[in-house]
Structure formats: C-alpha cells, structure tokens
Image (cartoon, rainbow, N blue to C red):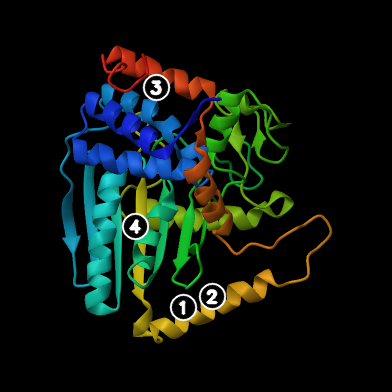
Amino acid sequence: MPNIQADRLRIIGARLLVAAGAKPDHAAVIAQHTVGANLAGHDSHGIMLVPTYIDRINKNHIEPLANYEVTRETDATITVDGHWGFGYVVSEYTMERVIEKAKAHGLGAATVFRQSHVGRVADYPLMAVREGMIGIMTADSGRSAKQVVPFGGRETRLGTNPICIAMPSNLDGPLYVDMATSAVAAGKINVAVARNTSIPEGWLIDKHGNATTDPAALRAGGGLLPLGGDQGYKGYGLSVMVEILSGILPGLGFGHEPSGRHNDGIFMAAFRVDAFLDLEQFKREVTEFAEYLKSTPKAEGFDEIFYPGEIEYITTQRNLVNGIDIEESTWNLLVDLAKGYGIATELGLA
C-alpha cells in the first residue's frame, strides 16, 4: 500500500474536487474531513470517498455550486435546505449556527435536508466541544437506497443511521461516541471489498437472508444487520429513533425512492455546559471519570482500557507522524482521476 502524508493527501483530494467543479474553499473543507477520517483510522470515510463524490458530481447527484438556505428558524432552532450541496460544507455551517444559538440561549438544535454525504458524524459535535459545549448529532440516508434490515427481517428498510455524542473534558483527546446503529458502517464493507478481505460473521446477510462473510454480498442484494447480534433489537430500536430524528423531522420522510441521490438528513444539537454546571468543574469531573474507567483491573487478553474516542486520538497522532496507508485500488483511482483532469504532473502523480 502507498503511504502518504496527511498534508499531501489533503492537497490531492482538494485539487481533484476543484477539477471536478467544487469551489476551492469547499474542496478544502471536504479534504480536511476525509483525510481526518483516515488519520483517525476510519478509512471507510476517508480519501477513498473522493472518487465517489466526483462520480456523483458527474451524475448531477451533487450540485457543487449549490447555495444552502435557511427555511425555518426560531431563537434556538434552525432548519437548512442544502440544495444538494456538499454535506460537509452545509453541516459545518449549520453546526456553527447551532453553536451561536446555544451561546445565546443555552442550547441550540437544527435539522438539515437535501445535502450530500456528511462523512464522519463526530466531526460536527466536536465543533461544539471546542466551544465548551456538549454536542449531539444523528444522521440517516434520507430516501436513498437502504442497507440495513430490521431485527428479524431479511429485506433492507433502514440506513446505517449513526449517532454521536461528544463531551468537553481536559483529556488529551476528545471523549465521544460515534457509531452506526447497524452492526458495522457500510463504508467498512466497502473497505473490505477494496482490500479483497472477508468480514466477520454477524455483519451481513446475503439476498436470501443467510449469514455471510463475503463483503460483495451487500451490493448483490444483501443487507447489514442491526447492532447487537442476538440482541439486535436494541440497535434496531436506536436506528428507528435516528431515522425519525434525521429523516421524518427534517421533512425527508422515510422509505426509499429510486432517485439515486444520496441524501443525508441530520439532527444536531449543542448544549452550553455552564447553563447547567460550571464548565471547568464539568471538564474536571469528566476527565476524572475517564481516568477512573481506565484504572479498572483488566480482563484477560486486554492490555489497556480506553475511554470512548481515545483510540481515534492515538491513531491520529501516530498517522500524523508515520503517514496514512492507502489501499492500491483507491490510490489507482486517485491517480487515474488526476491524469484524466491533466493535473497528475502538478500533483506528483505522473
């Protein structure tokens, strides 16, 4: 696998997106988010998505010059129509507005509809954390193709429907949970396909409803299972709530319409900690709580206990120094795109 430093990878991603029609400032935002996912070890949401976004631009599924629009607003809430623009850009703008409202009123909340893929959900609640707030976000795929079966079912009805909650603290890395309510994010299936590897049992069923370890089964009509294995009704229940918050509440509805457009609906909120408790006291106690958890005697086979989000922080620090490993198939796609746009020499990819 090629090993590429993060700064260079950001330049490559942004330059390709500009060549495909994105505004330079929007392309920089997308590259920052995608390479940030690679740094954190979540390659499923990393630079491998740039060719997908370019394909969606070419199919008019993403409007690279779209202007988002506020359609509803109160003192503490906002609803944004992304007009099929880049989800990263629209959701950053929306979280900035939510933070403004939380500063003024103690809390703020928003929904967004008609935007493209938003990437890692954690990126937006962490914006609130940097302002001394608790951040929350849920997301679904609108009425685009579904990939997850309800508990006990064998036909897809739900998205992977992630949820993130992030907390301010004094820890070296941020404390947050960011997870799909399916057994695994669909992007991790794509990574397994790209790397030609099998997947664990319990992630996926094939089109006949049978368990499989073949990641290609998803695109062949299979479905992801809800989070929780034989307790999957818990992940299913969470997924249903995320779908309501991120699909029905923003006005996207539910189900699937064959438009082909990926449509991330979201709900997000920020809470000013000092509306409830002194911020520094809260951060100190969250830090002490994390340290209390980490001090737990370790079960056999475990060398360390991590607080939620710590592994991503450690992985980011390591990858900033050592570079990011990119699978050959993704790298070849990036090189081919650069050649097609006539910028391979400029990017050192000729």
CB atoms of marks 3 and 1 within 8 Å: no
Q: Earlier in the sequence, mark 2 or mark 3?
A: 2
* Above or below for 99 versus 287: above
Which mark, residue 287? Answer: 2
- For the residues marked 3 and 1, what is the alpha-carbon distance in whole angstroms? 42 Å
- Crowding at dot 3, Cα within 10 Å, few <14 / some 14-19 / many 20+, comes out as many
Reading the image, the residue beneath label 4 is 249
Q: Amino acid at mark 1?
A: Lys
> Which is nearer the N-term, disc 4 or disc 1?
4
Q: Residue at x 54, y 75 (%)?
A: 287
Q: Amino acid at mark 4?
A: Leu
What's the CA distance linking mark 2 and mark 4?
A: 34 Å
Q: Place residue 26 in its image quadrant.
A: top left
Q: How many labels sit on residues? A: 4
Mark sitting earlier along the chain (2/4): 4
Q: Where residue 283 is drawn, which disc sits there?
A: 1
Query: For residue 334, which numbered disc appears in the image?
Result: 3
x, y (%) of residue 232?
Answer: 66, 52
Q: Secondary structure at mark 3?
A: helix
Residue type at mark 3 is Leu
Quarter that holds the C terminus: top left
